[in-house]
Image (cartoon, rainbow, N blue to C red):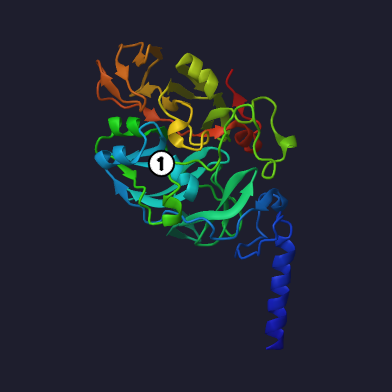
């Protein structure tokens, strides 16, 4: 009995010593059962901000259709849109600001829908993994920690810590495992239902009454001002990359572990950008009509930041080039018309769909903190 108690005390002391390397300015009790001995980043880069379990994730989300969705949401507010084999769902960034994670399923594909408002990073991952020789369905929640101002996620299966912006396991049993990205678009509610009239949108009736009363409002008032900086308590101002304004919005493209980023303001001026990165042929579309969820206190009053999306411009082995004529996206080869979701709605190519290039929107400071070697589109 004495030996058991000594071993238990030794284990607790070891955990306390290791966890002490994690920043904990509020002296929050360490209740995470993470294997801290296995890590691929310095533990001192991680900061405990809130106790474990502070965020209520959307684990059994309910959805509504077009009619109720257009009544429930402001038509210009942004959503993460996902389509799999003809079925589509949308998740309001404003609702995700309160919960940050939804564990869901679409057409039998397990989804991990994530949004970190501090980095403006909305990304969808596949939440089925193979480890220890078995396929396991993972469930995630915000850990209450941040690294480079970005959410650190926690899987409930092993309590491994994961970086939201990169999808990488950084501390714990599953250290260095990488989540698979599921391509998605960030578009407006109106754009979603125009493209997917039978689509479903996450309901505001989430079952969390303390959160429901705040949907439609922004707790990060004026946060995305391009002339401001991220919160210093979460991000060292000395680490800001000077090549872009820290709160500049960017879109990323990846191939074989290398990245290229596109400042949204440049794409906005052109409307369309045809580009190549490594072996990829891509096109970026921009159109106005989507507001920020990180601007004014009331989402409806927020500034129009528009929609920017990225597609592969190889269609059935044929390379296309695009232009924007007034508010219409056209391919130069056939003159067909395309919408913001990459669907051709008029012309020779009517009914064809461009493949979504895996991408997301981020603030420049956050992206460059994780991927400083990214090529920047000029």
User: Horizontal and vertical percent for residue 90?
Assistant: 36, 41
Residue at the image position 54 percent from the left and 58 percent from the top: 54
Residue at (53, 32) in percent of width and height: 254
Q: Is residue 278 left or right of residue 229?
A: left
Q: Residues within 10 Å of mark 1 (few under 14, many from 20)?
A: many
Does the image show residue 144?
yes
127 lies left or right of 158: left
Q: Residue at x 61, y 65 (%)?
A: 31
Residue on which the image places disc 1: 92
Residue placed at 35% from the left, 14% from the top? 331
Q: Is residue 171 above or below residue 375?
A: below
Q: Indicate the quadrant containing the N terminus: top left, top right, bottom left or bottom right.
A: bottom right
Give above or below for 97 relative to 133. Answer: above
Rendering coords of residue 277 (x, y %): 52, 23
Q: Position of residue 216 (x, y in %)?
A: 43, 41
Quarter location, residue 26:
bottom right
């Amino acid at each position: 009995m004495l030996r058991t108690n000594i071993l238990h005390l030794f284990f607790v002391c070891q955990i306390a010593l290791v966890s002490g390397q994690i920043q904990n300015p509020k002296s929050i009790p360490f209740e995470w059962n993470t294997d801290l001995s296995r890590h691929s980043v310095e533990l001192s880069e991680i900061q405990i901000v809130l106790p474990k379990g502070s965020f209520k994730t959307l684990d059994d989300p309910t959805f509504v259709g077009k009619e109720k969705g257009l009544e429930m949401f402001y038509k210009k507010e942004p959503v993460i849109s996902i389509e799999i084999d003809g079925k589509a769902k949308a998740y309001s960034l404003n609702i995700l600001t309160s919960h940050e994670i939804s564990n869901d399923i679409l057409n039998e594909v397990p989804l991990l829908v994530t949004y970190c408002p501090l980095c403006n990073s909305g990304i969808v991952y596949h939440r089925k993994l193979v480890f220890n020789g078995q396929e396991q369905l993972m469930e995630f929640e915000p850990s209450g920690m941040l690294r480079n101002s970005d959410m650190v996620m926690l899987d409930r299966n092993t309590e491994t810590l994961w970086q939201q912006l990169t999808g990488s396991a950084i501390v714990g049993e599953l250290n260095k495992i990488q989540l698979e990205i599921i391509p998605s678009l960030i578009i407006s509610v109106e754009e979603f239902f125009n493209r997917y009239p039978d689509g479903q949108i996450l309901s505001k009736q989430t079952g969390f009454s303390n959160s429901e009363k705040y949907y439609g409002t922004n707790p990060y008032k004026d946060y995305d001002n391009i002339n401001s900086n991220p919160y210093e308590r979460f991000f060292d101002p000395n680490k800001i990359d000077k090549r872009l304004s820290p709160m500049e919005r960017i879109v990323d493209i990846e191939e074989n572990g290398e990245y290229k980023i596109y400042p949204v303001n440049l794409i906005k001026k052109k409307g369309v950008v045809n580009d190549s990165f490594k072996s990829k042929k891509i096109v970026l579309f921009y159109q106005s009509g989507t507001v920020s969820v990180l601007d004014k206190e009331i989402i409806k009053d927020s500034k129009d930041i528009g929609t920017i999306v990225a597609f592969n411009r190889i269609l059935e082995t044929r390379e296309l080039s695009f232009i924007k004529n007034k508010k219409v996206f056209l391919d130069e080869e056939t003159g067909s018309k395309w919408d913001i979701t990459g669907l051709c709605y008029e012309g020779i190519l009517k009914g064809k769909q461009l493949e979504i290039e895996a991408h997301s929107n981020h603030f420049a400071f956050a992206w460059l903190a994780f991927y400083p070697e990214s090529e920047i589109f000029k």
